[in-house]
Amino acid sequence: MKHTISVLLQNKPGVLSRVTGLFSGRGFNIESLSVAETLEPSVSCLTLVTRGPDHIIEQITKQLHKLIDVIKVVDISESDYVEREMVLIRVKAESHTRAEVLRVIDIFRGKVVDVSPKSYAVEITGPQSKIKAVIDILKPIGIQEIIRTGTIAMARAKKF
Amino acid sequence: MKVTGAQAIIKCLQEQNVEVIFGFPGGAVIDLYDELERSDITHVLVRHEQAAVHAADAYGRVKGDVGVALVTSGPGATNTVTGIASAYMDSIPLVVFTGQVPTALIGNDAFQEVDIVGITRPCTKHNYLVKDPNELVPIIREAFYIARTGRPGPVLIDLPKDVVNAKITFTEPKPIKMQTYRPTYEPHPGQIAKACKEILKAKKPVIYAGGGVIASNSNEELTELATKLNIPVTMTLMGLGGFPGTHKLSMGMLGMHGTYYANMAVSKCDLLIAIGARFDDRVTGRIDAFAPHAKIIHVDIDPTSISKNVKVDIPIVADCKYALTAMNRWFDVQEDFKEKEQEERIAPWFDEINDWKRKHPLGYVEEGDIIKPQFVVQKLHELTKGEAIISTEVGQNQMWAAQFYHFNKPRHFLTSGGLGVMGYGFPAAIGAQMAAPGRTVIDVAGDGSLQMNIQELATARQYKCPVKIAILNNNFLGMVRQWQELFYEKRYAATGLEVAPDFVALAQAYGAVGLRATKISEVEPVIKEALKTDNTVIMDFVIAREEGVFPMVPAGKATTEMLLV
């Protein structure tokens, strides 16, 4: 099963490699990983998406927590959460498809961020399912380049 | 107070009560050595950096404190990796200082530069590159704290040459409190009660004790619990000495080369109480056939050890000493708990165990005048009254020592358990001797593994360490040969040591004493001679060449599928 794990860690050199080294060394897989500093510049937040049976996920969270530089580990997917990913896609846009591409981007509430006579570069944000949908639709038109940020996620606030 | 980085390091070592360190100098640490020479800290100059780490490891184990090693940059640092990885697998507290090129040169492929922090990241509990001289003192203090608390382990500090030479302010120590590292010592009372109730229900309980018992100094608490409840105890390789090996409740070691009765008891028990052990594959054999009928209680200070290999029913994250004390106190206040009744209730279980003991005791086949290695270890035990500190190399020698030297006290058995480092035993013996001068220290060695660090004869002689090396010499890399005999139709690929030194002459070349026994009647005189010699001694026991270690659970088999003598 897919899990989205949020890790707060000290913003120091080498910390990211402790995390990735743990995954490669123990044979855990990383589907995506995204990291940047928080409001507190000495602390970074890392969001990683991984897959595995429950006992592996349990090991992953425990092993992450065991790293000395790790402050907090939360398996966000255990409760309600919001996830987002951003993707930049350069899609072929020649005279007969230019209008269609714009229509598709509009439907997905995307933005054109770069234009050339034969292509558009577009920016789309959303949960993974939406990113997948837009890629599936644009593929037949011709995707020339694609860059994804990887998922970031936040647990929903308690309502009551 | 303004001091140099080097002076600050020495002050920090003194603050941590470090009396002996093991190391090897070089350009990057020459300033630190200059300062060290003028301090009251004893430095043991090894002949290879790997030996410095093993010696520090053993020194720490015998003392029950943190061992310290100091080496230079580049090859000095890379040579420590095996020692560090071994200490990491065995949860041994160490602080290793490595020299580094000046900060301005880092990343430039400078002479003797290596990214040792990167290299040792997966085999240290934590490591540091000190870039800011003002961080030096707090980092050293934190390193010692991390090494010795929680599940102990090695910590490495990489010291750029300019940091060692910088002028800094030496700050007074403060209690260490880390936001991100707070090991759990106290057990959850609810879990303790749950575990104790389960123990009272069990008809066939077994205690499975590991190195955590020794690391936490809880051998007395363990003995109290086992005797109070009359529960048989089996130990892992790392746990030997955590419970008296000659006690009537002891079943010796379990696992691949464990006793028949220990492995049978674990496979038939209805409750397995794991204390400071980690369900290593050498213990469990085929995992789905390990303790198949048992509920499992697992006490460990490291949460990642729990339910890693085997699903645990009652996890207790705590220091073994705290958890065992809590369990003992729980039984003390139970008004309806009577030791006598408990003993009677478990009596049928002991009938079963004793039956296994009678059927397949630990043993070996005598062969006329040929020396059997097990006999040598038994004689060592007898002639040292079981009081010696024993280190081992890795392989058959290690298993025979574990099986036949019945350790009654903790911190008397030094072995590279998890990583299985050939060449550990001799430097470890030197480290142990430095920690316990006046005590008998014996390295039970093989002729193969001893040669992996035999250069340390010079170190042993230089520091007048009267360690005794007992070579069980079969002229083979014996354990691999044994596997080849059993599973590869005796095709002895690369396990015959066709050229070997004359170990007696070799000892003499270093100014040590060499003795040899080639038949059974010579074993005792050689050991007696060695024990009364106040010098480093090599005892070369020429043993039965193709003797095997039994019982043996073939890799990947259930622990009940033992090959017996």
Image (cartoon, rainbow, N blue to C red):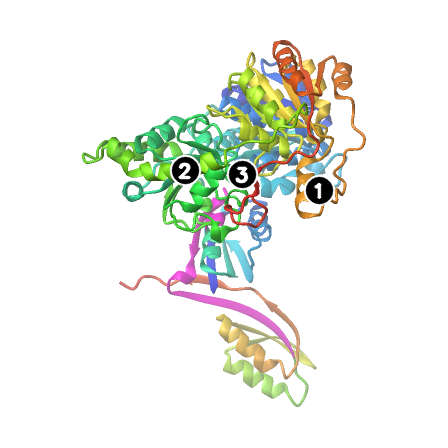
> What chain does mark 2 sit on?
B
**Contact? badges 2 and 3 (CB < 8 Å):** no
**Total tally of numbered discs in the picture:** 3
Of label 2 and label 3, which has the lower sequence position?
3
**Relative image position of residue B182 (x, y in whole percent):** 41, 39
Residue A89 is inside the magenta segment: yes
Q: Which residue is mark 2?
A: B353
Viewer-nearest of discs 2 and 3: 2
Left or right, B40 with reference to A78: right
Query: Mark 2 belongs to which amino acid?
Result: Ile
Residue B386 visible from this viewpoint: yes
Q: Which residue is mark 3?
A: B125
Of label 3 and label 1, which has the lower sequence position?
1
**Relative image position of residue B91 (x, y in whole percent):** 52, 35
**Residues marked 2 and 3, same chain:** yes
Viewer-nearest of discs 2 and 1: 2
Query: Mark 3 belongs to which amino acid?
Result: Lys
Q: Is residue B92 above or below residue B121?
A: above
Extreme residue toward the right, this view = B499
**Relative image position of residue B536 (x, y in whole percent):** 67, 15
Query: Mark 1 belongs to which amino acid?
Result: Gly
Extreme residue toward the front, this view = B368
On residue B107, which mark appears?
1
Extreme residue toward the bottom, this view = A96
**Contact? badges 2 and 1 (CB < 8 Å):** no
- B555 or B65: nearer the eye? B555
Q: Which residues are magenta?
A: A62-91
Of label 2 and label 1, which has the lower sequence position?
1
Quarter that holds the C terminus of chain B: top right
Q: Secondary structure at mark 3?
A: loop
Counting other residues with Cα less than 10 Å from the Cα at mark 2, is it few (<14), some (14-19), or many (20 or more)? many
